[in-house]
Amino acid sequence: MSGTEGLEQVATFCGKCNCGCPQLFVDPSATADRRVVLTDDFGQRVQMSADQFSSLIEDAKAGRLDGVITA
């Protein structure tokens, strides 16, 4: 994915194809409110604080995001 220079890669979601899977990065040079970066396979990105990302993880662990997944 272009535009990820200087970002520290944390995770790739999917990774089973060669289509530009969503990825999670940390941007050490960003302000604290934009340090966590999620990219998608369409070239878009979302930037958030570590606190916001932590809240997202807590919701996922608690099952509150399970309804988003469709079979």
Image: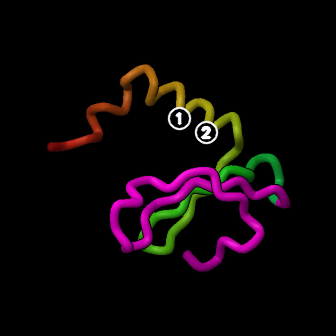
Query: Which residue was labeled with disc 2?
Result: 53
Task: Mark 1: give few (<14), some (14-19) or many (20+) Cα within 10 Å.
Answer: some
Relative side of 5 to 70, left or right: right
Which quadrant would residue 19 be assigned to in this image? bottom left
Above or below residue 51? Residue 12 is: below
Tags 2 and 1 touching, CB below 8 Å: yes
Residue 15 in the magenta stretch? The answer is yes
Image coordinates of residue 27 in percent, x first then y, are 75, 58
Image coordinates of residue 14 in percent, x first then y, are 38, 55
Query: Which residue was labeled with disc 1?
Result: 56
Residue farthest to the bottom, as pictured: 2
**Secondary structure beneath disc 1?**
helix
Above or below residue 65? Residue 30 is: below
Three-letter residue code for mark 1: Leu
Three-letter residue code for mark 2: Phe
Give the quadrant of the N terminus. Answer: bottom right
CA distance separating discs 2 and 1:
5 Å
**Secondary structure beneath disc 2?**
helix
Q: Is residue 34 visible?
A: no
Image coordinates of residue 35 in percent, x first then y, are 74, 52
Image: magenta residue range = 1-29
Determine the main secondary structure of the stretch shown in magenta.
loop
